[in-house]
Amino acid sequence: MPRDLPIGNGTLLAAFDFDYQIRDFYYPRVGKENHALGYPWRFGVWLEGEFSWLNRDSWVLQRDYVSDALVTAVTASHARLPLRLYFNDAIDYEKNILVRRVRVQNLSSRPLAPRIFFHTDLNAMENEIGDTVFFDPKNACLIHYKGPRYFLMSCATETTLGVTHFATGTKRHRGLEGTWRDAENGILGGNPIAQGSVDSVIGIHLSIAAGQEAVCHYWMAVGENYREVEELHRLVTQIGPDRLIERNIDYWRRWILAGEKDYYGLPTLLVERYRRSLLILRTQIDRGGAVIAANDTDIRQFNQDTYSYVWPRDGAIVSEALDRAGYGRMSRRFLEFCTQKAVNYNYSASILAETGFLMHKYNPDGSVGSSWQPWLQDGEMLLPIQEDETALVIWAIWSHYRVHRDIEAIRPIYSPFVERAADFLLGFRDDKTNLPLPSYDLWEERRGIFTFTTATVIGGLKAAANLATLFQDDERVNAYMTGAMEVKAALDQHLYCQREGRFARGILLDDGVQTRDTTVDSSLLGLVIFGGYDPLDERVVRTVQAVEERLWVKAGSGGLARYEGDSYQRALDREGVPGNPWLVCTLWLAQYRIAAARNRKALEQALPLLMWAAERALPSGVLPEQVHPESGDFISVSPLTWSHATLVAAVLDYIEKAQVLSGHESRPHPVVAGTDWR
């Protein structure tokens, strides 16, 4: 089940499922450790002998956020229970506190005494062995702990403070489902402590007059020891949970103002999705700079792994979009993560020092992440990399300077990272063709020499040349610009198909034999977005025509598939459906149309694609990786950071192009971050 309504502060992250249950709960880093492990944290209601857990089967749920804030706004109504519930959840922007406000409305003409229940299924440090939960009479709260992880939970009504109804016990062991079952008769057992594989429930008893409402709060303080969580708990009781929520609404509304633009008449829904995408991106970025691809553990069912890693490619695209949107500090943290933290871990440090490339992916702390890409194939040592990931980080570094003009930010990373990485791009080429040597494609499915990768190498080398210019490193300026031109000439010669009249996806290797891969792939749009090709170059135009004609999904939801015959989580196998539609791919097509536009009418041809993406979002604004071709239902993970960043970038492209066209109808719109065009 995809995730919705992420809230977080860069240290603590919570993500809900479609039943409004927390299913992922990360601390002390975004993406690591997940103390929920995908198990649901339930919310239940008991009234006059009837009990119901909150879910879509029994309740009508409306899931959304408070406008322009990382605070949820959820409404729940039941077919039989005469209650309406209103929820607000927030993770404090500064302190590691999760707080929930519940407003319970009595819809009947008589007094009611509902009981509500907060269930917590903690698996401290990402396993359910050796946990303890106990009732702390000192603070009238429940505390889960294991080692350096403490979780304090308490509650309050309008007249009471502290936990008076609770249960602790065993879960998923010897036939016991969990303590949450104890709530279903409306009475909690009050067991004061449990150890092993444990969960807990807190109950609140309310009394509501006819037609009136009652408000209560629940909170969780998270830290490394008892004293830390106790101090956070006292903070909540001192300032009040309501004020805590309101200060977060105010904070995030001030935060989003940094990205305010003249939207040049863009539809309201698209503007709302742009603003919400910026906020969602904020939740997926760790305080140490790691940009996490997605935090949705349900994807584990495919290979017992998740998307909770840093792919340098995804992070670079996020970084570039954030810089342009006005959030340079977050972008800089990512660049420092790549250039200082990630390269100092394990064997990757020596590899970067010797050869200058980044690895496949990284954990949120900068250590090397899991990988399926081998070091050995057919008795030959390989570099298990996707070269575009190294190239795009250089591209993002130049973008950061181009926006902020802060040479002090670039100086510490130029020599240690840019020089080595760009030198690697120069050297990692075939002596005969000048094309990059084989590496894995951006989809992580095949090894070869790919047009997308080659385009990013061009963009990366141009960016490196511009960066070298800042430090009057003339020798490298000439080397990098010459290299970029040589790679572009090689791409034109070896990756363009005269017979088809378009660019190939790449060149595949089979037992040393090279075969041109002419599969139509949406990543060919990277020729313009990253590689600096003229969008009106006839070869590019014909390539894009093939992409549109052969990859547009001719089914209910439309959208652009990744490539012909894409089988990854394929939902329909029939003519007219080359694969599931992807948000990133469809937005790339919008970016191409924007780049190619030479007047306002042509620019507006990108709007249907931008709106397609905006309309695929959940009411909360959350975007997935891909959707079902007919129903539009989410497939794979959500939110996907890459999707949100590409929406932000595409909207900014549109705004910048509209600005240019408003004064200069014929001025071309530059799209390559590897050249100083601002």
Image: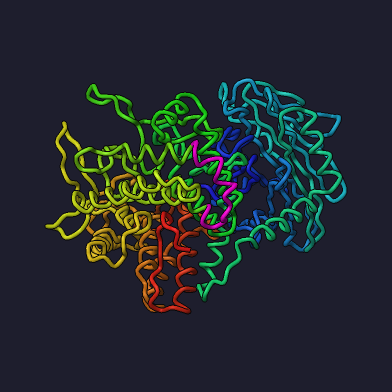
Q: Residue 591: give x, y in percent of width and height.
A: 39, 63
Q: Residue 494: give x, y in percent of width and height.
A: 19, 49
Residue 540 appears left or right of 210: left
Q: Nearer the viewer, residue 14 or 471?
A: 471
Q: Relative to 135, say whether 628 is above or below.
A: below
Residue 409 appears left or right of 470: right
Give the magenta-colored segment's residue range: 401-416
Magenta stretch, overall SS: helix
Count of marks placed on residues: 0
Q: Relative to 397, say whether 362 is above or below.
A: above
Q: Relative to 626, say whether 181 is above or below.
A: above
Residue 641 appears left or right of 252: left
Residue at point 65%, 30% (across, down): 199
Q: Residue 337: give x, y in percent of width and height.
A: 54, 39
Q: Is residue 670 visible?
A: yes
Residue at point 68%, 60% (across, down): 253
Question: To which quarter of the image does residue 177 belong?
Answer: top right
Q: Is residue 572 visible?
A: no
Q: Nearer the viewer, residue 531 or 568?
A: 531
Residue 635 appears left or right of 341: left
Q: Residue 630: give x, y in percent of width and height.
A: 35, 59
* Residue 246 lies within the magenta run: no
